[in-house]
Image (cartoon, rainbow, N blue to C red):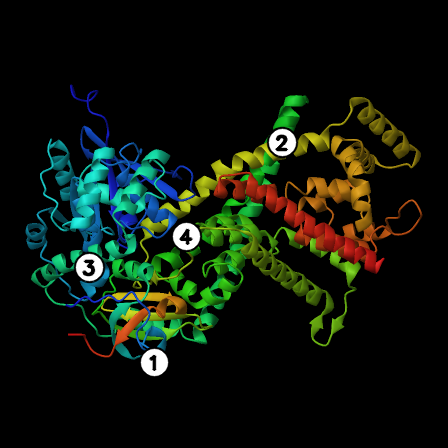
Amino acid sequence: MYPDLDMTQTKKIALLGNPNSGKSSLFNQLTGLRQKVGNFPGVTVERKSGYAKLKEDTEVLIVDLPGTYSLYPTSADERIAVNALLDKGNKDYPDLIIYIADVTNLERHLLLLTQVVDLGFPLLVALNMNDVAEEQHLQCDAIKLSEELNLEVVKINGRTGAGLEVLKEKISQLLSQDQWERVSDFYTLIPQEQMIVEEVRHLLPTRNDYHALLLVHHLSWLGFLTEDEKQNIQNIRDKHAFHPINNQLDEIMNRYKKFSPILPRILNRSYTTAKTLTDKVDAVLTHKIIGPFIFFMLMFFVFQAIFSWSALPMDYIDESFAMLSVSLQRALPVNLFTRLLTEGLIPGISGILVFVPQITILFLLITLLEEVGYMSRAVFMFDSIMQKFGLNGRSIVSLISGGACAIPAIMSTRTISNWKERLTTIMVTPLISCSARIPVFAILIGFVMPSYKIGFFNAQGLVFMGLYLFGVVAALTAAFVFKKVLKTEEYSFLMLELPEYRQPHWKNVFYTVYDKVRSFVFGAGKIILIISLILWFLASFGPPKMMKMASDVATIESSLLHYDAQQTALYVASKKLEFSYAGYAGRFIEPVIKPLGFDWKIGIALITSFAAREVFVGTISTLYSIGRDADNLTIRQKLQQEKNNEGKPVFTSAVSLSLILFYLLAMQCMSTLATVYRETRSWKWPAIQFVYMTGAAYLVSLLVYQLLK
Amino acid sequence: MVFRINLNNSLSTPKNITHLNIGEHAFIAAFSNGFIACKLMAMGLLPGSEIILVRKAPFGGACYIRAKQHYVVLRNKEAEHVILDSEVSK
């Protein structure tokens, strides 16, 4: 039926435009849920692509290139866009470009447009009519613009999807043409550039003069050029005393000179200088005092929401999976497979899904704040403080979210464009005390500080607060160290555009949240599942002889002590854990942790806590035969009675404080490490994070225990 | 519109964005740093553009300016390179 189908490859269409031009809305409109988010090779910038149906039988691949202001990139993500257009071998090298221009800032949007036109790509302009333009009754004569530019111009609305059908129709038409006949005439190379370009075009294949000129400009970072080619081009540059910045400036100005006169002819009026809604809102939201205050109120709300809204669904997930395990245990024969399924696999999956509510809520709220345009205001307000610690204004959002859970917090650093600042934020965020530390603190705090009141304050509450503050100080200190240690070639600058306030685009919010959750479940989730299976194995199995003996001895001891069935089961479980591989590991590390005041039982808890910090409570309960359902008070009473070989209490205040500080500082969360791996695309950073955090924890606990004991 | 770029720093105490009072208008005359010039021009801030200093960051360090329909924030060390005129240069 479709004779051409095998012959025609799927055409690639790139979406290109300035930041905040409505590119992602158009992308979502074109591809819907058929989008894929990956990474551009070698970097952590997200690569979004997806298929769009143009007609019944035509599918095209749409690639959403990172937003950039010009073909002279200033950041890693802008370079990706430019690289894709300059490298014919690049997998994102497009057959056609849809250029998105926003009508409210048309003059500026024309700069990049004229540059890509000069690169000689088949191109059409999607003129995004946004709400602000509508509000201000700003009108644009698309037909005239099309004549002036000699390009197809289609009016669209990224939010409503208006104009999409016409756009698709025009794309089909352009794709069916064999030849792209559009003379590049926005910029005439100056004589020096002419000479350089001529020599370069003898050296390597180029699309046209402007393409060659851009290679000359960008040769230092273009990965697809060979070292020889780079050297040759560099020689040509030197020969002609080429000064990139000067030429770039001249080019930009000549372009503006050429297209600026078009604007009065196509827009119904010039820009308004009257106070807009954005001016009025910003007078409050970025106010010297009210601004930061509102920010902290908002963050407090986000923090609260992650905590309280997620509690119910988390419990539900937890209980459903626990019930599933129990009913499967009853239904299936007792064998290794059943244990693997019910004790390893199902709790492992539950351990991944249990984070989904928190991730969903955080990203829902953060994406909303981003969508309405608030986030860049926060960057503006806090940039200078965060700079002192080598962080970015945006880092403050991640740090605060880290108070609920480090996983969504680390995922939220994707909005930080400077790699060093983003990496530093990722590295220090887990030092902020997350909700999983609370159960550990809650059990141990009683051993450090008795419950009484100092004035209005509860003494334990004050210690709690002190622990949180300590986490914040630790994170900022670590950031400061990373600032000194990490090297980057990337120039740190702000020069950030504040988008106008606008209504959130719910579709965009939905796709972003969906995407984050999916990438957590399938990205980090895989690693979490594997590690939790390993931990389950270590805690459930030991050398068979020893396990058998431990179980037999425990049973005999129980009968001598006249334990009832439940007590016996608990006692056997505790003895089995003692002789499991995890138990051996606990005893193995005892010499190392002894100076911190920890015995081998705490050692076992430290190892199993790697699954998640709150596992500490469960492990300790099993080790001391307390039973899973015991509340904190029972556990604490039991622990208080616990004596070591010399008959002294195990959980002294020195040991407890040392243990609390260890849990506060150490990297004991495989889910976080898996997330860091996913976000940095390398095991190097999670490894460094594990070593530095656990090392700091060791030193601090050592110091505290040795001073207090 | 007149484009004038001055890349040398030898102008006698030229006025820059950090010297503006809040709410004060001025016109961009030139840039004294090529990188910053390229970036800001690509963002739509050109020599000849009228700008207003809208406010300064609560904890200092950055300026918030408005030009036509653009709202842009930049650090003080970047703002220092934007040389201003009180009227459009002829």
Instruction: From the top left corner, tell me how far across and down residue A317 is, in percent.
Output: 55, 42
Amino acid tagged 2: Leu
Q: Marks 2 and 3, how far apart in space?
A: 61 Å
Q: Circle 4 is placed at which residue position?
A: A417
Of mark 2 and mark 4, the one earlier in the sequence is 4
Mark 1 is surrounded, within 10 Å at the Cα level, by few (under 14), some (14 to 19) or many (20 or more) other residues, namely few
**Secondary structure category for the residue under label 2:** helix
Q: To which chain does the residue with label 4 belong?
A: A
Which mark is in front, 3 or 4? Answer: 3
Cβ–Cβ below 8 Å for labels 2 and 3? no
The residue under the point 56% across, 40% down is A684
Q: Nearer the viewer, residue A506 or A369?
A: A369
Q: Circle 2 is placed at which residue position?
A: A533
Vertical position of residue A259 compared to residue A545: above or below: below
Instruction: From the top left corner, tell me how far across and down residue B17 is, in percent.
Output: 33, 73
Of mark 3 and mark 4, the one earlier in the sequence is 3
- Left or right: residue A139 versus residue A100 is left
Tell me, for residue B21, which label it has, or none: 1
Q: Nearer the viewer, residue A419 or A473?
A: A419
Residues flagged by tags 2 and 4 on a common chain = yes
Residues flagged by tags 1 and 2 on a common chain = no
Which mark is in front, 2 or 3? Answer: 3
